[in-house]
Image: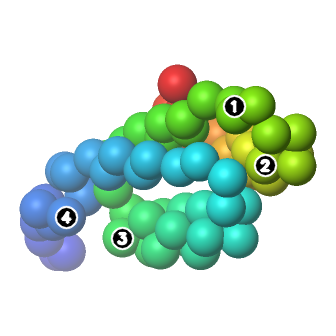
Amino acid sequence: MISKKKNAANEISILLITWRRPEHTLRSLYSALISCPKNIYIYNDGFSQNEIINQDIKKTRNLILDFSKIHKNIFVN
């Protein structure tokens, strides 16, 4: 019979704070998912007055939303 031991790492949650770096956010999400946390909470800081920066923020937010649709343990602010 296989014993089901709880892994302490699976009982933790992760808070990921993001802003305008979609590539870094993607790598961070993959790393977080590999550790199999109970939940991943993602906060994305607000827009700026610079439209070029806002384009990266929008890309980051869309990436986060796409991941949250696939992984039900990801929660977005």
Name the residue carrying label 2. 53
Name the residue carrying label 1. 47
Instruction: Kindly identify the residue that appears in the image at 36 percent across and 70 percent down.
Output: 35
What is the three-letter code of the residue carrying label 3?
A: Ser
Kindly check if marks 1 and 2 are in contact, taking CB atoms under 8 A apart as contact. Answer: yes
- Alpha carbon separation for disc pair 2 and 3: 31 Å
- Alpha carbon separation for disc pair 2 and 4: 35 Å
What is the three-letter code of the residue carrying label 4?
A: Ala
Position of residue 50 in the picture relative to residue 5 (left or right): right
Name the residue carrying label 3. 35
Kindly check if marks 1 and 3 are in contact, taking CB atoms under 8 A apart as contact. Answer: no
Position of residue 52 in the picture relative to residue 23 (left or right): right
Counting from the top left corner in percent of width and height, residue 2 is at 19, 74
What is the three-letter code of the residue carrying label 2?
A: Ile
User: Which residue is farthest top?
Assistant: 77
Q: Nearer the viewer, residue 17 or 28?
A: 17
- Reading the chain from its start, which is encountered first: label 3 or label 4? 4
In the rendered image, the vertical position of residue 31 relative to residue 46, given as above or below: below
In the rendered image, the vertical position of residue 43 relative to residue 14, given as above or below: above
- Alpha carbon separation for disc pair 1 and 3: 30 Å
Name the residue carrying label 4. 9
Instruction: Kindly identify the residue that appears in the image at 70 percent across and 34 percent down.
Output: 48
In the rendered image, the vertical position of residue 54 relative to residue 5, given as above or below: above
Counting from the top left corner in percent of width and height, residue 68 is at 65, 40
- Reading the chain from its start, which is encountered first: label 2 or label 4? 4
Assign a secondary structure to mark 3.
loop
What is the three-letter code of the residue carrying label 1?
A: Phe
Assign a secondary structure to mark 1.
loop
Nearer the viewer's eye, disc 1 or disc 3?
1
Kindly check if marks 3 and 4 are in contact, taking CB atoms under 8 A apart as contact. Answer: yes
